[in-house]
Amino acid sequence: MYIPKHFKLDDEEVIYDFIETYSFATLFSQHNGQPYATHLPLILNKSENALYGHFARPNEQWKDAENQQVLVIFQGPHCYISPSWYETAKAVPTWNYVAIHVYGKLEIIEDPNVIAESLHDMVNKYEQPDSPYSLSDVDPHYIEGMTKGIVAFKINITKIEAKAKLSQNHPVERQESVIKNLENSSKPENIQVAALMRKNLQK
């Protein structure tokens, strides 16, 4: 990924937080000699430096992805930045965003205990704390049947590239103007980007 020095994100905890918050990712590999992508949620295991997930079995990407160096992209909030928010007419539009690229070797998981733990982790992550649903309460035979329809995997992370393009290359006064305009927007992503910009300015 092209990362100018202004936008390089190298704080490991911040990167992990983005991965966990924006965990619906895009997984790229070579399939039948062509680039191929699947959109799916992934669970980060920090202690193992790995990502866990599963393909639908009919999705044949899994058949040749094992042992490949795959790329996973996590896309954070992003939005359009209008030059009308600057103090000069000598400006052009741009786009602010956060993106994390994770590279690693994909390993197919066969161990039913590891698969079960991975599925429990995923359900626990996305269910609300007060949700009455628990995978442990579901008929084990039903779970066993459903599990046959997926292919679980683990991605052992080898490299992470992270970019936070948040107008850091502009003067503070201009950044403040952008933040103010974004905060006045009704679009949730604009407000999220404004919050990230303000947090960045306060460092």
Image (cartoon, grey):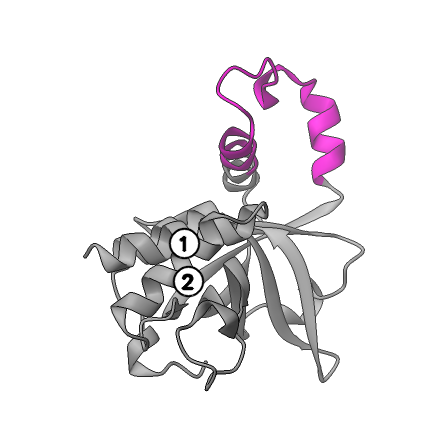
Part of the protein shown in magenta: 119-147
> Can residue 141 be spotted in the picture?
yes
Left or right: 39 as drawn, with respect to 185: right
Q: Which residue does the numbered mark 1 point to in the structure image?
A: 180
Please state which amino acid type lies under the numbered disc 2.
Answer: Val
Q: Residue 136 falls in which quadrant of the image?
A: top right
Please state which amino acid type lies under the numbered disc 1.
Answer: Lys
For image coordinates 52% across by 36% down, the residue present is: 113
Asked whether 175 or 90 is in front, the reply is 90
Residue 132 inside the magenta-drawn segment: yes
Quadrant including the C terminus: bottom left
Q: Which mark is residue 113?
A: none
Quadrant including the N terminus: bottom left
* Above or below: residue 140 compared with residue 126: above
Q: Residue 5 falls in which quadrant of the image?
A: bottom left
> Neighbour class for label 2 at 10 Å: few (<14), some, many (≥20)?
many
Residue 66 in the image: x percent, y percent? 58, 68
> Element at badge 1?
helix
* Above or below: residue 130 compared with residue 51: above
* Above or below: residue 151 compared with residue 166: above
User: Please, which residue is most extreme toward the right here?
Assistant: 58
Residue 94 in the image: x percent, y percent? 52, 75
Q: Which residue does the numbered mark 2 point to in the structure image?
A: 178
> Element at badge 2?
helix
Q: Residue 103 falls in which quadrant of the image?
A: bottom left
> Neighbour class for label 1 at 10 Å: few (<14), some, many (≥20)?
some
For image coordinates 37% across by 54% down, the residue present is: 196
In whole angstroms, how far apart are the C-alphas of marks 1 and 2?
A: 5 Å
Q: Are marks 1 and 2 in contact (CB under 8 Å)?
A: yes
Left or right: 142 as drawn, with respect to 134: right
